[in-house]
Image (cartoon, rainbow, N blue to C red):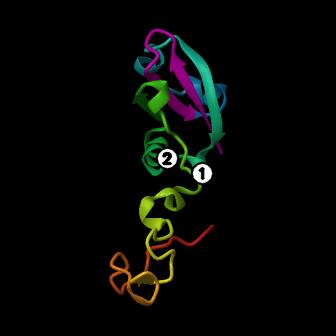
């Protein structure tokens, strides 16, 4: 299944998300359809939509979104966990759980690890 995003030509922050095709747009309630005129926009697979948009689309067959184009994020990002700062390599010990002290003559447990290990996400 695919989706299509329509952008209102009156208000550039008003977006309509519905199924792809003429019949999906024609099946919209008149009140929603007359918020336009609408111009076509992005398309994609429904499976890639963020969960809130996907669930609303399944429940009511359309989603009305009011957001500027720059803030409109419909699809999930593949590597979201890899970008989170908690999932990067520890800057002090570089993932070894030990940090040098006294100019490298001794080492001690990394204070950031705290004996728990560094949080890393599985790479997909």
Image spot of residue 60 (x, y percent): 44, 39
Sequence order check: which comes first, mark 1 or mark 2? 1
Q: Residue at x 38, y 81 (%)?
A: 110
Q: Which mark is residue 47?
A: 1
- Is residue 101 a member of the stretch shown in magenta? no
Q: Which mark is residue 114?
A: none
- The crowding category of the residue bearing disc 2, from other C-alpha atoms within 10 Å (few below 14, some 14 to 19, many at least 20), is many
| Chief secondary structure of the magenta portion | strand
Query: Closest to the observer: 50 or 101?
Result: 101
Q: Is residue 70 above or below residue 30?
A: below
Real-space CA distance between mark 1 and mark 2, rounded to the nearest whole angstrom: 8 Å
Q: Which residues make up the magenta segment?
A: 1-18
Q: Residue at x 64, y 34 (%)?
A: 43
Quarter holding the C terminus?
Answer: bottom right
Q: Which mark is residue 54?
A: 2
Helix, strand or loop for disc 2: helix
Image spot of residue 114 (x, y percent): 33, 82
Query: Closest to the observer: 30 or 37?
Result: 37
User: Is 108 on the left-hand or right-hand side of 37?
Assistant: left
Image spot of residue 73 (x, y percent): 49, 38
């Amino acid at each position: 299944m695919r989706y299509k995003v329509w952008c209102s030509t009156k208000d550039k922050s008003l977006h309509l998300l519905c199924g792809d095709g003429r019949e999906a747009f024609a099946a919209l309630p008149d009140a929603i359809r007359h918020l336009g005129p609408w111009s076509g926009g992005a398309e994609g697979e429904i499976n890639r939509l963020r969960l809130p948009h996907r669930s609303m689309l399944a429940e009511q067959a359309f989603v009305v979104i009011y957001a500027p184009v720059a803030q409109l994020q419909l699809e999930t990002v593949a590597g979201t966990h890899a970008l989170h700062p908690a999932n990067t390599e520890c800057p002090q010990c570089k993932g070894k759980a030990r940090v040098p002290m006294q100019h490298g003559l001794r080492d001690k447990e990394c204070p950031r690890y705290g004996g728990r290990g560094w949080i890393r996400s599985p790479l997909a």
